[in-house]
Amino acid sequence: MLFHHDSRAYDAAATHAAEWARDKFHDMTKSGMDKGVWLLQKVEAEEPEDRIVRARAMSFEPTETAIKMHVKDNDGWSTLSPLHKHALGQAVDRTELFNRKALSAYLDAGAWGREQVSAILTDAYQHIDSKRYLVRSTPDHVKGILSDRFRRMDSRPIVDAFVKEAMTSDKHLPMAVTDAHWLETSWNLRLMLCTTFEPVPNEVMAYGIQISNSDYGDGALSLRAFCLRLWCTNLAITEEAIRKVHVGRRLSDDIAYSQRTYELDTAATASAVGDTVRLLLSPAYVDEEMAKIKKAAESNVDPKTVLARLRARNDVLVGEAKEIAEAFNQPDIEMLPAGNNKWRLSNAISLIAGRKMEEDERRGCELQAIAGKVLR
């Protein structure tokens, strides 16, 4: 593992604390590389089958464990794979007859609940809705029921561009994969510079970039910078540099006709991702992010006011706000930095995010992004 010690390019840490942190960082990269390879294999293998289906040509049927979807085309009716919970939620949302909370209650009721949901959806799509939808499926599941304006982008060349620019460019320090998450309908990959920073005395940090995307409407394509506090591995996503919402021109009934647009959109996006990686990893940009952390550590904050604002925006739940407040107010200065400042509050949110990861990776990632918002 290579580490940078020259402050002429990067304001890198050089204290005894940094020596300890570098050892910890090295340990993180051991498992990170395996996770990265695993994720890239999953992305490479995932190639959804697309159909444009009119609402009245859709019906739903309960099975012993799930709900299946039937679609009709010129050759008659065909049965698709069971609906993934994400696609089922999309189908429910479009009817506006009941919400996700009611859907959960129905599904918790077992066979009777699945029968009710199937009947409601079939009736709704055959008699209420006259629109067309892009249905995206894999051999295992229907994973997305999307607008026919959904902009399809192939994740494979996009993540390839991200990794190639980050790992092979000679414009910045070497990088290492440190984490990856495959959430069935979305994914993210994290890489970090092979060095440490100390923007605040004894606050040893690592800096990295994350790419995330969904081929099924479960989040936009996003490229973000993040900082990791190595004492306790609290992570905060500090900046969102790219956010491309999947909205484009209306797809024709013939999916193959739109293939050229699909390829051009993907190529343009992959190029933009490569350009942005270079920006996020430039020494000037990284040092600017470290300066933000230094400023946050010097900025006093009223946690009650900030948490109330986050609650009002539905960024955090009531229970989460309580956990964050309790973490912030505890005397611990190992899991959290000392002080009554933005930096400590951001780390309190990151600490709770780490706990959430064990039971809900998706929510954990969302809270890490919220931790970064507090620093701005």
Image: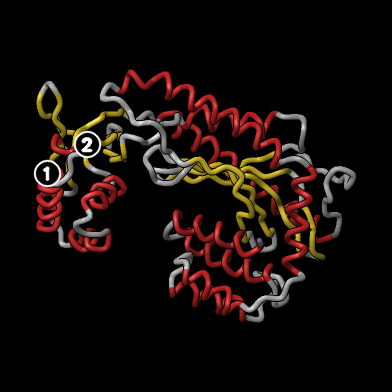
Q: Which residue is mark 2?
A: 81
Which structural element holds mark 1? Answer: strand
Q: Which mark is residue 366?
A: none
Q: Quadrant of the N terminus?
A: top right
Q: Which residue is mark 1?
A: 61
Q: Nearer the viewer, residue 139 or 2?
A: 139
Q: Nearer the viewer, residue 260 or 160?
A: 260
Residue 232: % across, % down: 65, 63
Q: Which residue appears at 18% of the width and 60% of the height?
A: 106
Image position of 338 with respect to 254: above or below: below
Residues at discs 2 and 1 in contact (Cβ within 8 Å): no
Residue 9: % across, % down: 85, 43
Image position of 137 with respect to 293: above or below: above
The answer to whether 235 appears left or right of 14 in the picture is left
The answer to whether 74 appears left or right of 195 in the picture is left
The answer to whether 274 appears left or right of 245 in the picture is right
Residue 177: % across, % down: 62, 41
Q: Neighbour class for label 2 at 10 Å: few (<14), some, many (≥20)?
A: some
Q: Which residue appears at 73% of the width and 71% of the height?
A: 299
Cα–Cα span, label 2 and label 1: 11 Å
Q: Which residue appears at 79% of the width and 58% of the height?
A: 198
Image position of 209 with respect to 330: above or below: above
Which quadrant of the figure has residue 31?
top right
Which structural element holds mark 2? Answer: strand
Q: Nearer the viewer, residue 156 or 17?
A: 156
Residue 354: % across, % down: 54, 61
Q: Neighbour class for label 1 at 10 Å: few (<14), some, many (≥20)?
A: some
